[in-house]
Image (cartoon, rainbow, N blue to C red):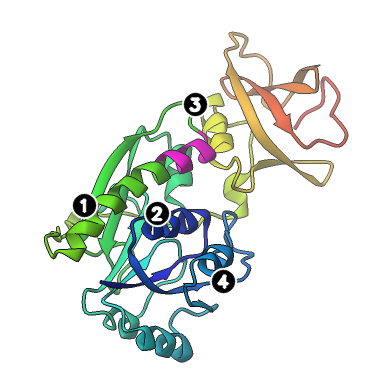
Amino acid sequence: MKIVFIGTVLFSYKSLEKLINLKAEIVGVITQKTSSFNSDFYDLTPLCTQHNIPINYTQDINADDTLLWIKDKQPDIIFCFGWSSLIKKSLLELPSMGIVGFHPAKLPQNRGRHPLIWAIVLGLTESASTFFFMDEGADSGDILSQETFAILKNDTAHSLYEKMTQIALKQIETFLVKLQNNSYQRVPQNHQEANYWRKRGFRDGIIDFRMSKKAIYNLVRALSKPYIGASLIYKKEIIHIWKVEEITLSDNTIESGKVLDIQDNMLYIKCYDGIIKIIEHNFTTLPKIGEYL
């Protein structure tokens, strides 16, 4: 079974490495040399060079020259694990077995953008690692493999990304054999149960201390590394916040945003229903006790 692999992020690298270790027949890789869009961008070049896999760099997966390159490889199937743009019909119809995509959500729920980030921001306690056959929609094709996983209160973007990756690699090991011997199943999605998450913008990552302590805590852990970090504005400077702690406060007479204390470079800020302790940040000049953020 000849495979063309498409991807450009850390998960792509891990998946490609897994396929190589499983002796899958990778006849070509489509990727990018750099990316200003993906915060978890990862260069696949060294891995391809090491294993003598032909590589093609493109910014447009649907471009004519990219399609010709893929067609020349005569793939039976394409794996697209970590690519941000929609794939058009001309490419979808090229391999006889179709294109398998990946989405870290419990499809048909939570289709769309930034699934791990939104799951943590919204305080979800469960998500899933889902491989599916791509169609012209967004994350709407038949499911090939799906495994749920828990989202713990102390999970961050990094820990959840790692958890998702390890589960997905085990799925690849299982469904690769089924694809090779034609024993796989396609499970149609129930589109009536579907919802779509939108693209996250800069404003979505700004901390407003009128928010609850839980909402701020979830926002910070959702945008922690490898993502850009939650932020606040102090003296016209963008301050990135990487780690916080929730603290209960019974006194509700203190206005939100007030700096209550500073100890060992950590700040205690009043929020709507308690205190947020800012543990990791990039303040160059600390605010003073009594100031408002």
Q: Amino acid at mark 3?
A: Asn
Residue contact between numbered discs 3 and 2, judged by CB atoms under 8 Å: no
Marks 4 and 1: which is nearer the front? Answer: 4
Q: Is residue 145 left or right of residue 264?
A: left
Up the image or down, 143 lies above or below 234; here it is below
CA–CA distance between discs 2 and 4? 20 Å
Residue 164 appears left or right of 244: left
* Label 4 Cα crowd, 10 Å radius (few <14 / some 14-19 / many 20+): many
> Where, quadrant-wise, is the C terminus in this rendering?
top right
The image's mark for residue 233 is: none
Q: Nearer the viewer, mark 3 or mark 2?
A: 2
Mark 3 or 1 closer to N-term? 3
Bounds of the magenta span?
156-163
Q: Are the residues at dot 2 and dot 1 in contact (C-beta closer than 8 Å)? A: no
Q: Nearer the N terminus, badge 3 or badge 4?
A: 4
Above or below for 269 versus 223: above
Q: Give the number of the mark in front: 2 or 4.
A: 2
Residue 154: mark: 3
Give the position of the N terminus as an image quadrant: bottom left
Q: Is residue 109 visible?
A: no
Depth check, front residue: 292 or 207? 207
Q: Which SS class for mark 1?
A: helix
Tag shown at residue 18: 2
In the rendered structure, which disc, 4 or 1, sits on the residue that comes first in sequence? 4
Look at the picture and state if 269 lies above or below 43: above
For label 4, the residue is 32
| Disc 3/disc 4 C-alpha distance (Å) | 33 Å
Can you identify the residue that label 1 sits on?
193
Residue drawn at point x = 57 percent, y = 42 percent = 223
> The residue tagged with tag 2: helix, strand or loop?
helix
Query: Along the polypeptide, which appears first: circle 2 or circle 4?
Result: 2
